[in-house]
Amino acid sequence: MSTEVVIAGAGIVGAAIAAALTNAGVGVTIVERAQVGGGATAAGMGHIVVMDDSEAQFALTKYSRDLWQSLLEVMPAAVEYEPAGTLWVAVDEEELQACRQKQRYYDDHQVVSELLDEKALREAEPNLAPGMAGGLLVPGDSVIYAPTAARWLLDHALEGGATLVKGEVEAFESGGVRLSSQRLACDIAICALGTAATKFFPHLAVKPRKGHLVITDRYPYFVRHQLVELGYLKSAHSHSTESVAFNVQPRRTGQVLIGSSREYDQTGSELNDSLLRQMLERAALYMPDLANLNILRMWTGFRAATPDKLPLIGLTRPGVYLATGHEGLGITTSLGTARILADQILQRRPDIPIAPYLPSRFDGREAS
Amino acid sequence: MALLDDNPGPGGQIWRLHSNQWTTRMRASGCEFLPQATVFEVRGSHRLGVWMEGEAHDLTYQKLILATGARELFLPFPGWTLPHVMGAGGLQALAKGGLPIRGKRIVVAGSGPLLFAVAAYLKSQGAIVPLIAEQTTLLDLALFAAGLEANKFHEAGRLLWDLRAIRYRPSTWVTSTTAGLVRLNRGKPVPCDYLACAYGLIPNLELARVLGCAIRKGTTIVDETCQTSVADVHAVGEINGIAGEELALIEGRIAGYAATGQTIKVTRHLPRRARLLEFRRLLSRTFALRHELRKLAAADTIVCRCEDVRFSQVQAAADERDAKLQTRCGMGPCQGRVCGPACEFLFNWPAGTLRPPLAPVPVSAYLNRQP
Ligand SMILES: Cc1cc2nc3c(=O)[nH]c(=O)nc-3n(C[C@H](O)[C@H](O)[C@H](O)COP(=O)(O)OP(=O)(O)OC[C@H]3O[C@@H](n4cnc5c(N)ncnc54)[C@H](O)[C@@H]3O)c2cc1C
Ligand SMILES: Cc1cc2nc3c(=O)[nH]c(=O)nc-3n(C[C@H](O)[C@H](O)[C@H](O)COP(=O)(O)OP(=O)(O)OC[C@H]3O[C@@H](n4cnc5c(N)ncnc54)[C@H](O)[C@@H]3O)c2cc1C
């Protein structure tokens, strides 16, 4: 098989694209400078979640979640798939009202959800602080371990004839991709470099958005669902410089993963002590006994954020496609991204409308 | 002045809470001793996060002396995770803590002078030590003995006299063990109740690394006054290289005087330190680990005990981080403190990145901070 496509970046997005194109019989070479799935993919929570900030965000996350579910039977155990479901926690009547609205939207869009009152919420999650108004359970959401998922998708592509090249991409040229050690000729290049994409395409409306995560020792059943505060919609998705939200996840190992923070204008990986404290204080507000769990490790990662919270999937200039800008949802949306990018390259009819994700939507607008 | 230690009392590995002239002098000096105090993070310049009495405290300092010591190096071989297998120093500590060993058969194996000390102690407590298996060669041991200065030679001689009834076998190592039996690279399997096995000591460099102290070949780099590459931070004892009690005591004095500006007193100890540094070099040369020890593990031998990761899984990884991401090797409660150094030796990987906290602390350590 000849190489028709070179993919730069073996994060979960690049790996998913490699798998999708190989499935379609396309010759693929994928270039990665470090560990497979070792970038943002290794930093993220791995929550596979349907989100409804916008129609387009809903369409891509729902489509992607369905694709993940379709793979369950062939997924290896190492991917640590947990059908935990998402539980949106409403602290007061106002937030519970928002849950009801969300539920109506989900009902209209074939997403199963279940409204929990105060008592049902306590039964579902006994370690939540008493007095919470209720919540909305979305049982179809899940949790995976993204680095092994990326490795699995990539291995699938390699078995189908794709090639992995270890190296540093230095330029996207016409008719090829230049690495430090060699030049890979190709008809089509795909930039799946996450936040590093702006190094090659400085005009892109993509900014790094730093996040902190904390993992505890093993406490099986301390948390049962992926818990997210409903205020998340207000706090985490606003565009202010710094924010934290209650976001707690049960891992297959029995560990508890605690998030989340969002912060612009940061490039170093060091911990921001005050933001970390705010994040943990918020978590302990929702789950007081969390304070007693032992922390094993804390780290940071960078999301590739865009102004409209939608990824960039499509042609940016002749022969060069983009697949970046997935912000806090790239693990979820990697599969949908791969499909609609392959559809564009192979001129297939996509399953969902793709206009909202095309990079050309920002043409003529400067990066904000 | 404050001395903090994560143990309940002063004394570190060898004195282990038994008071002696140094702990007595320390207590009489007016130095505050903070027991069960764990440094769990570095909070900017001249500031440490300390977990103590169920709370996190900020500790600021003008001068910091690191004396974080060493731990045993364990290498995986079939059976090493079975309950009858322990570290050499580890079994000694357990025996001191009350584990009954009188009349028990204990094979002592691994590498380094610690094996002698442990065997002598076990024997003095009534254990039967049928064999000490030392991986290094007889030639290296002979060169070592020849290189010892008189007082160290006497020390060694006394130990050997104590151990005269025990078979001491160079170029010998454990290839596998099952309950009640130890197999060696040569000779018949040896029946035993316990196997005490460690491949020497490795410095506890975590705090020094997080402080940014320059490190080379697994030890801190210090000048004559035990000053590290970081201003106001000194390092003493085993973290500067494994050499045992005598050098640790000298360096402790040097750093104490240097940190308090008593330069003349520093000078007095320099010649002795220089000679002991020779001994340290001699030790590391003599007990360097042989290549065969990289080949002991079978495909299904566990390498990471916290996460049950097997040798073949780790072997398939491209590097330390790839192993961590794909197999969870080093991701458990000990954060690679045990398997990390083993993998560095087995696969020639550089040390992995350190992330806070330095020791597990509850979430509450980050909530309401006490100054
Ligand atoms: C704290 C946090 C929590 C998150 N939680 C979730 C979640 O719960 N659910 C979810 O769906 N998403 C989540 N995300 C988002 C998700 O992690 C990312 O959107 C996703 O991993 C992006 O994948 P990627 O392949 O685009 O990028 P990356 O994983 O960053 O991959 C890019 C790759 O390109 C390589 N590379 C870069 N430059 C070069 C070069 N010059 N040459 C060669 N290779 C290069 C890098 O080494 C890297 O491997 C979270 C993100 C963060 C930071
Ligand atoms: C198991 C074992 C047995 C040994 N037996 C002998 C022997 O018989 N003879 C001999 O000469 N040498 C022996 N050694 C070597 C011995 O460690 C040194 O000779 C001597 O103890 C060196 O003193 P030190 O102060 O450098 O380290 P140590 O005595 O190890 O003291 C270090 C102290 O720092 C504490 N500490 C480490 N990190 C932190 C932190 N983050 N926060 C708070 N406290 C911390 C530790 O708990 C420990 O109490 C042994 C070593 C080990 C590991």
Image: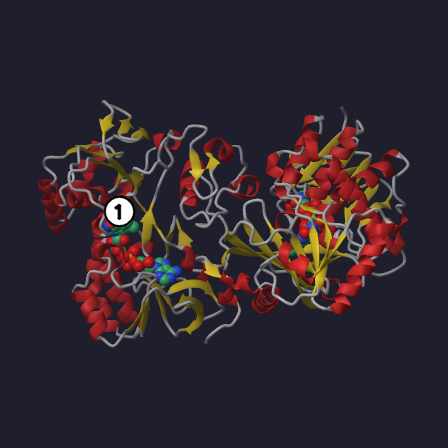
For the question of whether residue A185 can be seen, the reply is no
Q: Quadrant of the C terminus of chain B?
A: bottom left
Mark 1 neighbour class, 10 Å CA radius: few under 14, some 14 to 19, many 20 or more: many
Please, is residue B186 above or below residue A356 in the view? above
| Left or right, residue B237 beside residue A155 | left
For mark 1, give the secondary structure: helix
How is this picture coloured?
Answer: secondary structure
Amino acid under disc 1: Gly
| Left or right, residue A168 beside residue A205 | left
Q: Determine which residue is flagged by label 1.
A: B89
Which is nearer the eye, A271 or A101? A101
Which is nearer the eye, A113 or B279? A113
Please, is residue B243 above or below residue B199 in the view? below
Q: Quadrant of the N terminus of chain B?
A: bottom left
Task: Give coordinates of residue B182: x percent, y percent.
Answer: 27, 29
Which is nearer the eye, A358 or B366? B366
| Left or right, residue B24 beside residue A305 | left
Task: Find residue B164 and report its image quarter.
Answer: top left
For the question of whether residue A157 can be seen, the reply is yes
Task: Give coordinates of residue B140: x percent, y percent.
Answer: 22, 36
State whether label 1 is within 8 Å of ligand 2. yes
Which is nearer the eye, A213 or B114? A213
Please, is residue B278 above or below residue B12 in the view? above
Q: What is the tally of numbered marks visible in this picture?
A: 1
Residue at figure coordinates x 25%, y 37% from the top left: B194
| Chain name for mark 1 | B
Task: Find residue B252 and report its image quarter.
Answer: bottom left
Task: Give coordinates of residue A212: x percent, y percent.
Answer: 61, 59
Q: Quarter for ligand 2?
A: bottom left
Task: Give coordinates of residue B95: x percent, y percent.
Answer: 22, 48
Residue at figure coordinates x 68%, y 57% from the top left: A120
